[in-house]
């Protein structure tokens, strides 16, 4: 969100943080989580890099998740609290419920929540390393960290 | 000369013999031909130049800068479908997989029959395809850059009973990075900024980047130039205005932006502009195989097949930045993490189908395209039937599970019995996760001015001195990747304008 955040942006920021924490919680599996990948700040920076229409759409998306959860209670949201006031499990359950909804716009809304932060999560070097991604040559001008190894020859037959 | 942002900041006002809007597949060919013919040629490109040092493997970062609408553009209609197009010098050829197929003869015959276009079977078009394919250096993807993701795709096709082969691509010394969608920093992909625009510049063409055309200028019924705004590609601030005066205007901004330019200029061609938009529809199967495939290396799209059962159905291996591909897949919360361990065994096959669809493009309030695509459910069922074929083949080869992104189907298909759900007639187009990256026909070509926007020579009906030279003029979907056809049609259109030989 922009440096001098409006009321709208502050609520959206809370929604973004709540979503990112819920989708990438601390875990026992050794997977990089929300904090390890600086996910909230990186997603906010990515949003700022977008054209105005997309910036507004994403800000509205996170504003919506923060304040609409109690409004959408009949559709799986449960509970009267703001999204960020719920536990991580409750937030994940809400998004999962919306993704499975018969209401198409609600499914799109929830898919957008998941897809946006997941995309930024997957682009972090810690995750790239964790999944074993590599490339066959080093790009000298690219700050994106990725291991370099040749393509296995046996795979090319 | 190529004018970058610092050169055009503050605006400009120039004269030319011809102004070309867009520097992608169509615009670049036109620029090369017309500059070689001795015309003072100006190209106006909305995006910035992107060089290897600008490219990054950080998918979201690259898309936000070099794709229209930050890579988040969606087509609405039957569903909400991502439509990713490049916004940079070279257009979508910088960010596509460089697959180039000549238009199949049966599609050329269909275009002739649908719209009375006798020239579709003429030797001049054969010559045009030959020229563009040769100059772009198209050849089958070499085996040494395939990687296991492509060769396991070959094995999957074999298991499905599909005759397959390496895909023909316009690359030289491909290194198998799988980076095509974020630009080829290795310089192997022969995108038009490498293969065509340098020749245009050498012959005197002037290319202005960061320049968004707002409208074609006309005096009476004659095009006399264009005007627009210089836009900072980073902050998107408007930095100035520009005007190019020319008695010949060629619009080559693509199936989404060309109708927008015309409509904003008050050119409707009897209501046909934007009225016949179409796109290939698609599906995909992401199989988690029983071996490591390291999907992030190997040619982005190295292996392909055509369905022998369904005309216009094509199958392709595919990879994209992992951040883009895996973002929608799977559940939410802690259980999602398990996917990370599976990614090393992924094989991804995309299905692309020349469906009978309808659509439209109009102008959004912010000046961007508002594109709608309507897909009959019966056409999506065709994709589902062929998708099941691929899913069954993946399972036969030992895939642990297959993800298709189709609602109502098990998220992880593990058995052929579960794959039967793909044949359900409860599936609707909005249930299918697909992208619509091959788009056409929004200003289609027709021998009947009442049914099209341009004639067989690309001339806009009712406006002298105005041509279109991109996929918007396709009479219907091409059934194959559209780049080569765009280039061939632009080649003929521009050669006629420049009085160059057609054979």
Image (cartoon, rainbow, N blue to C red):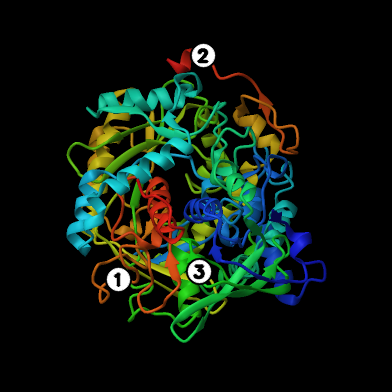
Give SS at disc 2: helix
Kindly check if marks 2 and 3 are in contact, taking CB atoms under 8 A apart as contact.
no
How many neighbours does mark 2 have within 10 angstroms: few (below 14), some (14-19), or many (20 or more)?
Answer: few
A149 lies above or below A103: above
Q: Is residue B24 above or below residue B183?
A: below
Q: Chain of mark 2?
A: A
Q: Residue at x 69, y 58 (%)?
A: A17
Counting from the top left corner in percent of width and height, residue B191 is at 54, 43
Q: Which residue lies at the image location 62% right of the left edge and 42% below the top edge? A: A122
Q: Name the residue furthest top.
A: A154
- Mark in the foreground, 2 or 1: 1
Dot 3 and dot 1 within a common chain: yes
Q: Which residue is mark 2?
A: A153
Q: Circle 3 sits on which residue?
A: B249
Q: Position of residue B105 (x, y in %)?
A: 23, 44
Q: Residues within 10 Å of mark 3 (few under 14, many from 20)?
A: many
Comparing B466 with B141, the one in front is B466
Classify residue B286 by image quadrant. Answer: top left
User: Do we see residue B35 in this rendering?
Assistant: yes
Label number found at residue B452: 1
Q: Identify which residue, A80 or B49, lies in the foreground.
A: B49
Q: Residue B44, percent across and down?
A: 60, 63
Q: Earlier in the sequence, mark 3 or mark 1?
A: 3
């Amino acid at each position: 969100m922009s440096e001098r955040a409006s009321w709208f942006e502050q609520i959206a920021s809370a929604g973004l943080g709540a979503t990112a924490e819920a989708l990438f919680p601390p875990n026992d599996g050794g997977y990089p989580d929300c904090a390890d990948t600086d996910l909230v700040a990186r997603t906010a920076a990515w949003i700022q890099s977008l054209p105005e229409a997309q910036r507004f759409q994403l800000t509205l998306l996170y504003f919506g998740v923060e304040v609409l959860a109690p409004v959408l209670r009949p559709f799986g949201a449960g509970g009267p609290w703001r999204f960020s006031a719920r536990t991580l499990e409750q937030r994940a359950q809400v998004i999962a419920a919306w993704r499975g909804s018969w209401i198409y716009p609600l499914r799109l809304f929830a898919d957008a929540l998941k897809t946006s932060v997941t995309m930024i999560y997957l682009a972090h070097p810690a995750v790239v390393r964790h999944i074993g991604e590599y490339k066959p040559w080093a790009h000298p001008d690219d700050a994106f960290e990725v291991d370099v190894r040749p393509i296995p020859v046996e795979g090319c037959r | 000369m190529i004018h970058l942002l610092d050169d055009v900041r503050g605006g400009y006002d120039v004269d030319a013999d011809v102004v070309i809007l867009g520097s992608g597949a169509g615009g670049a060919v036109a620029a090369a031909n017309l500059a070689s013919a001795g015309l003072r040629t100006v190209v106006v490109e909305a995006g910035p130049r992107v060089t290897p040092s600008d490219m990054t493997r950080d998918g979201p970062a690259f898309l936000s800068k070099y794709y229209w609408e930050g890579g988040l553009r969606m087509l609405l209609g039957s569903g909400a479908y991502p439509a990713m197009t490049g916004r940079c010098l070279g257009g979508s050829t910088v960010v596509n997989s460089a697959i180039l197929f000549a238009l199949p003869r049966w599609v050329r015959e269909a275009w002739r029959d649908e719209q009375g276009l006798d020239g579709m079977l003429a030797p001049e078009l054969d010559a045009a395809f030959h020229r563009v394919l040769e100059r772009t250096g198209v050849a089958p993807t070499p085996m040494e850059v395939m990687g296991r993701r492509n060769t396991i795709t070959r094995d999957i096709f074999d298991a499905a009973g599909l005759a397959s082969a390496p895909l023909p691509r316009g690359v030289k010394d491909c290194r198998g990075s799988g980076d095509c969608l974020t630009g080829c920093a290795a310089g192997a992909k022969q995108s038009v900024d490498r293969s065509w625009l340098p020749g245009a510049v050498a012959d005197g063409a002037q290319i202005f980047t960061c320049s968004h055309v707002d409208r074609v200028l006309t005096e009476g019924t004659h095009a006399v130039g264009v005007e627009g705004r210089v836009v900072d590609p980073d902050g998107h601030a408007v930095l100035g205005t520009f005007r190019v005066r020319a008695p010949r205007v060629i619009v080559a901004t693509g199936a989404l932006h060309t109708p927008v330019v015309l409509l904003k200029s008050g050119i409707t061609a009897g209501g046909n502009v934007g009225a016949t938009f179409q796109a290939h529809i698609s599906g995909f199967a992401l199989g988690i195989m029983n071996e490591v495939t390291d999907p992030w290396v190997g040619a982005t799209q190295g292996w392909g097949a055509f369905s022998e059962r369904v005309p216009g159905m094509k199958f392709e291996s595919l990879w994209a930045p992992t951040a883009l591909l895996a973002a929608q897949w799977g559940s939410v919360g802690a259980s999602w993490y398990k996917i990370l361990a599976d990614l090393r065994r992924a094989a991804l096959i995309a299905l692309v189908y020349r469906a009978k669809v309808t659509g439209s493009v109009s102008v959004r309030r912010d000046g961007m395209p508002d594109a709608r695509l309507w897909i009959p459910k019966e056409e999506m069922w065709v994709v589902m039937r062929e998708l099941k074929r691929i899913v069954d083949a993946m399972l036969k080869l030992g895939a642990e599970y297959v993800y298709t992104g189709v609602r109502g189907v098990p998220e992880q298909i593990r058995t052929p019995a579960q794959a039967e759900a793909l044949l359900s007639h409860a599936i609707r187009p909005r249930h299918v996760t697909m992208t619509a990256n091959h788009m056409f026909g929004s200003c289609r070509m027709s021998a009947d001015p009442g049914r099209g926007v341009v004639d067989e020579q690309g001339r806009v009906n009712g406006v002298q001195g105005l041509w279109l030279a991109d996929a918007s003029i396709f009479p219907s979907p091409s059934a194959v990747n559209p780049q080569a056809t765009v280039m061939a049609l632009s080649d003929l259109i521009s050669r006629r304008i420049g009085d160059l030989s057609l054979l």
